[in-house]
Image (cartoon, grey):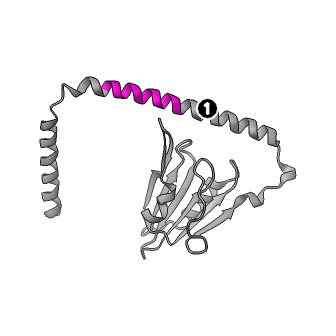
Amino acid sequence: MERKLFLGANTADGLVHFFTELIEMYDLKKLYVLKGGSGIGKSTFIKKFASAFEHPKTCINYFYCSGDPRSLDGAVIEFPNGVNIGIIDGTHPHPIDPRYPGIIDEIINLGEFITSKDLSVTKAQIDKISAAKQNHYKQAFGHLAKAREFHYKLESSYKNAVDFDKIDALLNKLIEKTVQQINNNF
């Protein structure tokens, strides 16, 4: 089985993520934390690693990047025996360092495989591109904040016209109905 999920979101308050909660959420026995720059192949590495364990009885949770949903930020493989293994991108904007080095977490530095003489970009160019990227994210977060402001204005225009007691009554009936269905195995 395969699930496609997000561990983070770009919000009006900036990037919000739950990478640090991954070990507890899935009771991981091993977490590989990838390090290395943009374009080094972390997403491809994650995909190839996780897909190597595809099996009808294995559940693979793919966690996609909130900034580029074509790119993977991580994966958790849930094995039928209860052993769960994770692999994540531990670089900016969600830097992760091992909490349990040598026990659960292991750093894999893909930066070791960069051949400096073959780089077609200078430090100054990287700094310029990174600054432009950060500026655009800052602008995007500002736009999301403005959108949230308008959302709240819309909400407030409806509040006085809604009968929340009736909605609560409907909610309670739905909960009761669902509990009965669960107890009767649907």
The residue segment tinted magenta is: 141-154
User: Main SS type for the magenta part?
Assistant: helix
Q: Is residue 12 rendered to the left or right of residue 90?
A: left
Exactly how many numbered labels are in the figure?
1
- What x and y, as percent, mark residue 126? 76, 41
Q: Is residue 52 magenta?
A: no
Residue found 67% across the figure and 57% down from its top: 35
Q: Is residue 83 rendered to the left or right of residue 133?
A: left
Q: Amino acid at mark 1?
A: His
Q: Image quadrant for the N terminus?
A: bottom left
Residue found 53% across the figure and 68% down from its top: 53
Q: Image quadrant for the C terminus?
A: bottom left
The answer to whether any part of residue 60 appears in the image is: yes
Residue found 40% across the figure and 27% down from its top: 149
Residue found 15% across the figure and 32% down from its top: 163
- What x and y, as percent, mark residue 74? 54, 56
Q: Is residue 139 above or below residue 8?
A: above
Q: Quadrant of residue 88?
A: bottom right
Q: Is residue 179 rendered to the left or right of residue 86?
A: left
- Return the residue at label 1: 136
- What x and y, as percent, mark residue 105? 58, 68
